[in-house]
Image (cartoon, rainbow, N blue to C red):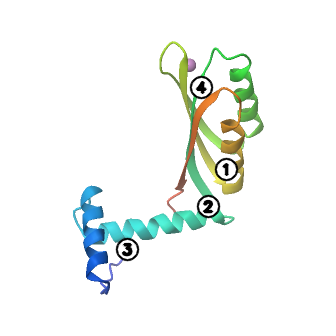
Amino acid sequence: MAKLIRFGVSLEEELLKKFDSLLHRKRYTNRSEAIRDLIREDLVRQEWQGDGEISGAITLIYDHHKRELLEKITDIQHHYQKAIISTQHIHLDHHNCLEIIAVKGDAKKAQELADTLRSIKGVKHGTLSMSSTGRNLA
Ligand code: NI
């Protein structure tokens, strides 16, 4: 386990009040874990701006009855096959599908894939969850 270091932080009372209320809403039980997560959040943001390896997930909502939509989505995924580690397709109801595409590797490729899929006519909603391989986070 990594060595823990204690350090003091000085900040304005008002700011600390806001921070405490935020961490309460976000279900943190102590400030340390909330601060650790803020730091990790920023490190992950930097991973996505750099050349290192990232991981994440793209979600898409679409109507599979739309003409050629499924075919387009599949074609694109084959084209980006090196960036995709897994795809899950869930039939939400008679019309709507939820597709979860797990990605790993180059951040720019993952972003490009998400943008390409989201911009297809007929895709109702798309998100990109930018996460990490976890290797550079304590
Ligand atoms: Ni479906």
Front: mark 4 or 3:
4
Q: Earlier in the sequence, mark 1 or mark 4?
A: 4
Local packing at callout 2 (Cα closer than 10 Å; few below 14, some 14-19, many 20+) is many
Answer with mark 2 or mark 3, whichever residue precedes in sequence: 3
- Return the x and y of residue 14 as percentages of the image width and height: 28, 77
Packing grade of label 1 (10 A; few <14, some 14-19, many >=20) is: some
Tell me where residue 105 appears, x and y as whole percent.
65, 53
Q: Secondary structure at mark 3?
A: loop
Q: Nearer the viewer, residue 110 or 53?
A: 110
Could you say which is closer to the camera, residue 84 or residue 128?
A: 128
Which quarter of the rendered picture does the N terminus lie within?
Answer: bottom left
Q: Position of residue 7 (x, y in %)?
A: 31, 86
Q: Which residue is mark 2?
A: 48
- The residue wearing badge 3 is 2
- Residue under label 4: 62
| Identity, as a three-letter code, of the amino acid under mark 4 | Tyr
* Local secondary structure at mark 2: helix
Q: Are marks 2 and 1 in contact (CB under 8 Å)?
A: yes
